[in-house]
Amino acid sequence: MKITLLVVGKTTTGYLKPGIDDYTARLGHYVPFDIQYVQDARNTRNQSEAQQKQNEGRGILSSVDKGDYMVLLDEHGREMTSMQFSEYVQKRMSSGVRRVVFVIGGPYGFSEEVYERANEKISLSKMTFSHEMVRVIFAEQLYRAFTILNHEPYHHE
């Protein structure tokens, strides 16, 4: 199985990029993992939030294949502990899916078409984080999940 983190827009906050790169490298020891970028909405002053979500949604949907298992990282999704998330990852790996795509939307979230295509939604917290900060938080949690599954001394319960 391959895992892709699909994100809207490049990471522009300088202090987040090294963390994302670090966890991306660490994940490479466990699973094929990559981050794909969808262009964020341009000329946003002339667009409503709905128009921005539609434009970003088209980019998201064009980056996901028919057979991919698509999981939205969404504030209204199911919450899990790190242990539960590691079990979730294990189930996805055992399900025979070739690629799981976790998606982080833009600042206004997802279009209705993206919600309709998604297989499920997961929330990382009841708190709201910037869509760039979620990238490093998710990468760390995915790394944590693999260390839990491999009984390595990273996660302390």
Image: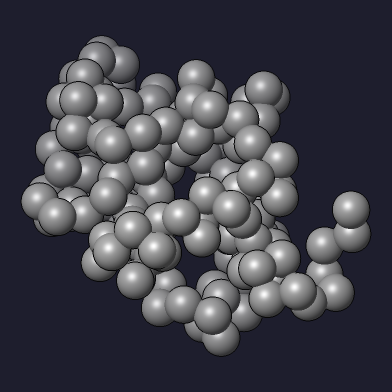
Residue at the limit of the structure toward the right, as seen here: 156
Q: Is residue 50 above or below residue 111?
A: above
- Taking the image as drawn, is residue 41 in sight? no
Using the image, determine if residue 16 lies above or below residue 82.
Answer: below
Q: Residue 103: give x, y in percent of width and height.
A: 37, 45
Residue 9 percent across, percent down from the top left? 36, 49
Tell me which residue sits at (21%, 19%) in the image. Answer: 112
137 or 154, nearer to the observer: 154
* Colour scheme: one colour
How many marks the image carries: the answer is 0
Q: Position of residue 24 (x, y in %)?
A: 54, 73
The x and y percentages for residue 53 are 26, 25
Left or right of 16 on screen, residue 115: left
Describe residue 137's horizontal placement relative to residue 5 as left or right.
right
Quarter of the image with the N terminus is: bottom left
Asked whether, in this view, residue 71 is left or right of residue 99, the answer is right
Q: In this view, does 38 lie above or below 155?
A: above
> Could one spot residue 66 in this view of the protein?
yes
Q: Which residue corresponds to the image point at 82% horizontal and 70% vertical from the top-left?
A: 154
* Residue 153, picture quadrant: bottom right
The residue that appears at 51% across and 60% down in the rendered structure is 90
78 or 124: nearer the eye?
Answer: 78
Determine the residue located farthest toward the bottom in the rendered image: 29
Left or right of 35 on screen, residue 53 = left
- At 29% from the left edge and 45% from the top edge, which residue is drawn? 70
